[in-house]
């Protein structure tokens, strides 16, 4: 019998960027814990559909260097921080000096702040031991980050403009990058973080990301995640969220690019009255593989969660949605709503969806629904009989499927990028012969 | 304008039209009547270009062009309009967006520049009032949650907006109460013009009290078996289809 493959030790060797002692210790511990990690196979529950697309050869292990000349699309009108291959590039960044707002790269952290960062990371959901039967590859980030951002909002701070974090991956050889963003939002603070993942170059690379949000009482945080990376990028990202009393978290994720993309979004509603809203739009084409795993834990009572994901798969692409809602025993009066609708544009495309409910409280309102369908021929005929080209008819019908989610993205620039990406997708998916 | 010769068509291998002939000239209003299952709706779907129907023989020309060679959208752009018997509900696509895309597709085909949003809004409001539809409908999804009557009025509104050369109305009267029937009939009458033809498909004579046709045809088993003036409809109303030796096929099937 073939023995199970384990993670190559090459993946456990960081490059050696200067970091505060607290973070170095944490990283060392994480790496030690990952030694002999058994790699996922199709029998691994949380990698059932995606394991075969995973490419973790030794050449992918080396840390991609900071590239000082990589061009970035940083826009001066908004607050921006640029990371190239997971390393902050201060000269491309532009954000305000505001009382109550602190944006620091890891290497600049004071001892106290480094301890806070290490604490956030050690409690990080992505670094929790994996459930039995599943493999948590996002733990790699904890063992490999070279740099990162600690964003702190003091209580009551309201940031009027979104903060853009541009994650640019660029390489002229194979390798990987491990960007890490930590957000500590104080009580009643408010802000919007846009993470824009882009890439340049045609080398096979892996981006392994961690984004961790900690929301104090009454904090209101919106996270926008946009993926437009090129076709040679393997993306494995984790977003962890902890919410205290009456806080609100909103997530909008829009994904286009990449060969394999995996995103794990894990929200814990830990304080009473907290609420979260998770929206996701995924379009895949060619042979892309896109896997969204979400978990919402209702830990405290009286919390609300609402989740809406839409997948559209063209050509021979494959989209996976696994949405888990876990209602703890004390989480009475929980209100959880999950909807996942899927659209197959070709017979060669595949979509797998699995809603999971785990409920231990007895007084809850929980609803979930998943559908998979195709564009309706009668609807196409109706539109075309009014003079619309078959392409326009299909675009209208497909947009109808996701319009609501795109319109809800609270940042205009991201909505525009989403529309541009969608138009490019439609041009390829609905080519007129 | 429209010339149908020996038209044979089938759907899912079931032969529905069996050698239908019909000539329609500009300015004329024709009514096609017939029992259920006689092929009325098949005729309208074939003319509009629904690919679910196969034409197995015969020819159709529209203003001299071979209609059957044209794709569905080309027929629409050349001026063929079908008011659907069962308009499709399309949640998420707003009526306004749909209608503007439609109007501009027609304009582009005729080399006219796009109508801007403001101009279009004004026009759309006007025509929606003409069929007694609250302009708020424009913001809703296409036919989404519309009552049967509202859907039919929306179809007539589209005809008024698109100003087709040939309007085919497939049982646009069915499911309407008297007041709605009057509104729809007024809308259709407003379409009557010397350069436009109207083909009405109906099961009942009552629509023809409001829209008086120039010709009435009786369809049975996929063929026109009798043609006449408006008086033919009255005769059918009085005597039933049995008078022509036709059994209502649906009734027969269910009986």
Image (tube, coloured by chain):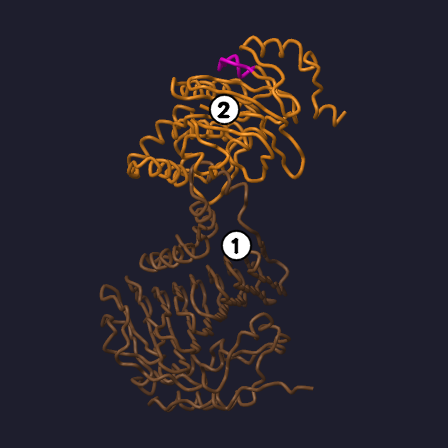
Residue A306 in view in this figure: no
Mark 1, residue position: A345
Instruction: Judge left or right: residue A424 versus residue A68.
Output: right
Front one among B229 and A221: B229
* Residue B174, position as x, y percentages in the image: 57, 24
Number of numbered tags placed on the structure image: 2
Chain shown orange: that is B
Quadrant (top left, top right, bottom left, bottom right) of the N terminus of chain A? bottom right
The outermost residue toward the right is B255
Looking at the picture, do discs 1 and 2 lie on one chain?
Answer: no
Above or below: residue B141 compared with residue A98:
above
Q: Which residue is the site of mark 2?
A: B3
x and y percent of residue A234 in the render? 46, 74
Residue A303 part of the magenta segment? no
Q: Nearer the viewer, residue B58 or B72?
A: B58
Is B214 magenta? The answer is yes
Please tell me which residue is depicted at 24% across the width and 75% down the height of the picture. A92
Query: Which residues fall within the magenta stretch?
Result: B206-216
Is A286 above or below relative to A400? below
């Amino acid at each position: 019998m073939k023995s199970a493959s384990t993670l190559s030790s090459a993946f456990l060797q960081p490059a050696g960027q200067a970091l505060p002692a607290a973070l170095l210790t944490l990283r060392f511990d994480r790496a030690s814990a990952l030694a002999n990690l058994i790699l996922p196979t199709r029998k691994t529950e949380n990698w059932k559909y995606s394991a075969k697309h995973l490419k973790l050869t030794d050449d992918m292990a080396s840390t991609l260097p900071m590239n000082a000349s990589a061009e970035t699309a940083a826009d001066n009108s908004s607050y921006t921080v640029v990371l190239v291959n997971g390393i902050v590039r201060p000269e491309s960044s532009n954000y305000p000096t505001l009382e109550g707002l602190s944006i620091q790269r890891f290497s600049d952290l004071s001892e106290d702040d480094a301890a806070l960062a290490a604490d956030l990371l050690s409690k990080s959901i992505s670094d929790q031991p994996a459930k039995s039967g599943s493999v948590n590859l996002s733990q790699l980030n904890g063992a490999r980050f070279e740099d990162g951002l600690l964003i702190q909002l003091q209580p009551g701070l309201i940031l009027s403009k979104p903060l853009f974090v541009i994650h640019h991956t660029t390489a002229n050889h194979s390798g990987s990058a491990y960007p890490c963003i930590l957000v500590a939002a104080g009580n009643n603070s408010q802000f919007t973080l846009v993470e824009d993942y882009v890439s340049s170059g045609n080398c096979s690379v892996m981006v392994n990301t961690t984004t961790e949000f900690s929301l104090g009482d009454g904090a209101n945080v919106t996270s926008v995640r946009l993926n437009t990376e090129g076709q040679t990028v393997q993306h494995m990202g984790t977003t962890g969220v902890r919410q205290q009393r009456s806080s609100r978290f909103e997530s909008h994720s829009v994904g286009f690019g990449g060969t394999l993309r995996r995103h794990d979004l894990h929200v814990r509603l830990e304080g009473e009255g907290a609420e979260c809203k998770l929206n996701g739009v995924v379009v895949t084409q060619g042979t892309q593989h896109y896997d969204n795993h979400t978990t919402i834990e209702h830990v405290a009572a009286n919390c609300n969660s609402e989740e809406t994901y839409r997948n559209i798969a063209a050509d021979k692409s494959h989209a996976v949605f696994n949405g888990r809602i876990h209602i703890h025993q004390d989480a009475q009066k929980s209100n959880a709503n999950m909807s996942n609708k899927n659209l197959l544009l070709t017979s060669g495309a595949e979509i797998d969806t699995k809603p999971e409910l785990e409920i231990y409280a007895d007084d809850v309102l929980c609803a979930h629904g998943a559908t998979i369908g195709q564009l309706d021929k009668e609807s196409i005929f109706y539109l075309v009989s009014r003079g619309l080209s078959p392409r326009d008819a299909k675009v209208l019908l497909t947009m109808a499927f996701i319009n609501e989610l795109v319109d809800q993205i609270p940042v205009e620039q991201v909505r525009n990028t989403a529309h541009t990406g969608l138009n490019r997708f439609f041009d390829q998916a609905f080519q007129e012969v | 304008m429209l010339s149908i010769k020996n038209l044979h068509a089938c759907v899912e291998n079931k032969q529905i039209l069996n050698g239908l002939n019909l000539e329609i000239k500009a300015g004329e209003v024709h009514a096609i009547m017939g029992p259920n299952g006689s092929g009325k709706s098949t005729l309208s779907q074939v003319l509009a270009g629904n690919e679910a129907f196969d034409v197995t023989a015969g020819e159709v020309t529209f203003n001299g062009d071979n209609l059957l060679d044209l794709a569905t959208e080309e027929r629409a752009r050349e001026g063929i309009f079908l008011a659907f018997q069962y308009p499709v509900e399309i949640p998420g696509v707003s009526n306004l967006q749909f209608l503007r895309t439609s109007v501009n597709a027609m304009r582009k085909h005729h080399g006219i520049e796009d109508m801007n949003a403001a101009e279009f809004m004004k026009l759309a409001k006007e025509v929606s009032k003409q069929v007694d539809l609250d302009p708020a409908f424009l913001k809703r999804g296409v036919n989404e949650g519309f009552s049967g009557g509202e859907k039919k009025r929306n179809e007539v509104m589209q005809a008024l907006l698109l100003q087709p050369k040939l309007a085919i109305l497939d049982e646009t009267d069915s499911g309407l109460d008297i007041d709605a029937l009057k509104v729809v009939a007024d809308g259709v009458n407003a379409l009557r013009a010397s350069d436009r033809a109207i083909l009405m498909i109906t099961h009942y004579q009552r629509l023809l009290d409001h829209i008086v046709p120039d010709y009435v045809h009786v369809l049975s088993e996929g063929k026109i078996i009798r043609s006449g003036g408006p008086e033919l409809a009255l005769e059918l109303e009085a005597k039933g289809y049995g008078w022509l030796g036709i059994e209502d096929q649906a009734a027969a099937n269910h009986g």
